[in-house]
Structure formats: structure tokens, C-alpha cells
Image (cartoon, rainbow, N blue to C red):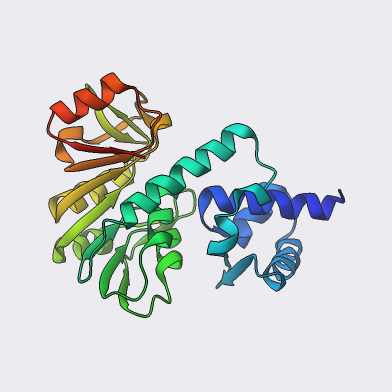
Amino acid sequence: MADSEKRRSLIQQYLVQNGACSISALASRLEVSTMTIRRDMELLAGKGLVRVYHGVVVPLKEEATSLQEYALTKAEAVHVQEKLRIARAAASMVEPEDILFIDGGSTAALVARELPRGIPLTIICLSLNAFLNVAGNPAAEVILAGGIYHEETHIFEGPESIELIRRYRATKAFVSANGFREDLGVTCSNNYLLSIKQAVLRSSIQKILVADSSKFGKVNSCYFADLSDFSELITDDGLPDSALQSIRDSGTKVQAV
């Protein structure tokens, strides 16, 4: 395989896992110029594999769900499939007239992408990934929280985003996490995410944690909620039966898909 073909294959793999990425970040990641990445994106866009919005590359839905097209390792492929199952289960809960908060993170971005089209929704996006995955939904009112953009998480953070979250009330919030344990709660890895996630939980009726089983047992530095603070956990079938029962006993509904 030529170097250029290998590079484009790596880009496709990365986009499937992360949902979207800026051209500058891809250039830095692959140690090439932004012009090289732009040429790659022109070729991939011409094949209908990606779309570029204002310097951000987004995989198209049909390609992103065709996992066999990518030369992922076995672990990566399983991980992506789990996230897709979780995202589809979460999206199936959405009803007409719902008001939604969509968190940052790759699983939440997939939830945004899988949301039903053609029904009236209000969708409040906390990340660029989620926003790009719902932008253009003809029946939805789409709102993007403002503030400082963080490249590593695609999250917008600041007083503007917190104030926007406080002004709204959501029927459902889909929240992501980097780790969750029964004893030490639900955690993330960046301090600036704490106030956002906690504001979302305070402003929502149904609080739904979307996290694959690889996050179970992990603890990150920033605690933002207990599992019992969520009305539901949507995860995959890799969670131990003992953990499933314990979480359910605490009053949190669990879908293991």
C-alpha cells in the first residue's frame, strides 16, 4: 500500500472511533502538512466517505457503520461495535418533542448521529462532534453551547455554556464518562468538564449514562456523579453480572446491549 493510501486509511480509522476531527489536528497527528490532509480529504469526500465543515472532517454515516471497511485491530473493532450498539439503543429512546442534552465523547457523538430524523426535537450539543452529527436534521432545532473550544475533547466550555445549560430543561440527557465504579462513582479526566456535566444533570429529567463496559472499574481524577444519580445506564453486554445486579439494586436501570 502506498504511503498516501495508508495515511488515508489511518484517517478513516481515527474518524470512525472519534466521530470528527479538525484538519489541523489530523495533520499534527500524522506529522504532515495541513495541505496534505486537505488533498486527502478532497479524495475521500469525492468517494462519499467524509464531509468537511469549516476545517472539521466528519465521516459520513453509511461509511462509519461499515466497520469491515477499516483495517482496525480486533480490540478496536469490538470497541467501536459496542459504542454503536449503545448509541443505537440510546437513540431508540428518543420521542417526538424531546429536549436533549448531548454530551461530548465518542459514544455521545454516535448517539447524536443515530438520532431519528423527521421528528421534532430540540438538541443541545455540548461538543463539536455531536453538533456536526445533527446539523442539517430538518425537523430539529439544534443548539451548540458556546465558550472555549478544547481540541482534545471537542467540547466548548466556559460561562456561556454553563449559562445556556441552566436556561434549558431537558427531557433526556445523554452523558458520557471515562470511568465508572459502584463505590467511587462516575469520573472524567478533565476538570473543566465537571461543571458542565453537573449542570446537565441538574437540568434534566432522565439522566442517561452511555458508557461501554471497558470503562467499568476505571477511576479518573475528576468525580462528577454517583451511579445512583443516573436514571439509566446504557452499556454493552461485557459488564459482569454481579456489577449489573449491584447497579440495578441501587435504583439505576441498566440496558446491556
User: Which quarter of the figure has residue 112?
Assistant: bottom left
Position of residue 46 measured from the top left corner of the image (x, y, whole percent):
71, 73
Residue at horizontal 18 percent and vertical 30 percent from the top:
248
Q: Residue furthest top?
A: 242
Q: Is residue 28 visible?
A: no
Name the quadrant containing residue 34: bottom right
48 on left or right of 82 = right
Asked whether, in this view, residue 239 is left or right of residue 9, the answer is: left
Left or right of 16? Residue 204 is left
The image shows residue 9 at horizontal and vertical percentages of: 72, 51
Residue 97, percent across and down? 20, 71
Q: Quadrant of the C terminus?
A: top left
- Residue at left offset 36%, top offset 63%: 115
Considering depth in this image, is 5 or 239 the residue closer to the camera? 239
Left or right position of 229 against 88: left
Q: Nearer the viewer, residue 66 or 103?
A: 66
Q: Residue at x 33, y 66 (%)?
A: 146
Q: Residue furthest right?
A: 2
Q: Measuring 32% from the left and 52% from the top, which residue is drawn there?
A: 90
- The image quadrant of residue 182 is top left
